[in-house]
Image: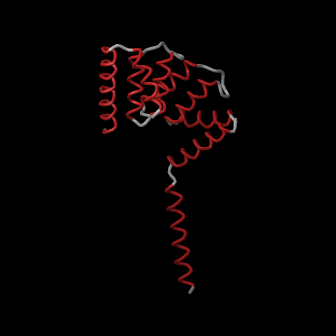
Amino acid sequence: MFKKNITCKIILLYFFITLSFSFSAKSQTSVSIQTAEQALSNGNYEKALDIWQILSNRGNLIAINNLGFMYERGYGVTRNQKKAVALYKKAAEGGIAVAQFNYGEALFLGNGIKKDYIEAKKWLLIALDRGSKDALYLLKDVNKLISKEENTESKNRFILWKNNFNKKQAN
């Protein structure tokens, strides 16, 4: 009986140790991002900003995009469109679809950056390719404003970016 209880305790201990190690840094990061998102939705901008700043300093691209959002809207910080665009661009280049949409939208509207419909369309195509449904709606507006040649240029830039990004991911 004593041996059976020890065996059960060892198995349970092993299970809990294995379980605790399975919560990697990625899991902890997503919990922190969820905490920041909850803080933002509750209007606690300072807490959200603190969490996203810490995670962005660690290179978390989602946090970098979310910091851009904070700067774009002026939540907990002085509104700064140029800083927002720089953050969106960094996260977009890293492959974050929502950041790719945000960067494309900024280029389309000229928020914090000079309007560039060709580059806007490229980033919106990338965002759409990576799953952003919002990009589809904005692409319709971009298409009304660009020429056939500009459309071709945007598509060529999209293909080049996608090929380069896929090569980086493969390495």
Q: Position of residue 164 (x, y in %)?
A: 31, 29
Residue 72 occupies quadrant:
top right
Q: Position of residue 147 (x, y in %)?
A: 34, 13
Residue 170 occupies quadrant:
top left
Q: Going 40% across and 36% down the picture, which residue do you hit?
A: 130
Q: Quadrant of the C terminus?
A: top left
Q: Position of residue 156 (x, y in %)?
A: 29, 22
Q: Going 49% across and 56% down the picture, which residue do you hit?
A: 22
Q: Position of residue 31 (x, y in %)?
A: 57, 47
Q: Nearer the viewer, residue 25 or 106?
A: 106
In the displayed structure, would residue 3 be above or below residue 143? below
Q: Going 62% across and 25% down the picture, which residue do you hit?
A: 73
In the rendered view, how is the structure colored? secondary structure
Q: Nearer the viewer, residue 147 or 162?
A: 147
Relative horizontal placement of residue 162, taking residue 74 as reference (left or right): left
Q: Going 42% across and 28% down the picture, which residue do you hit?
A: 93
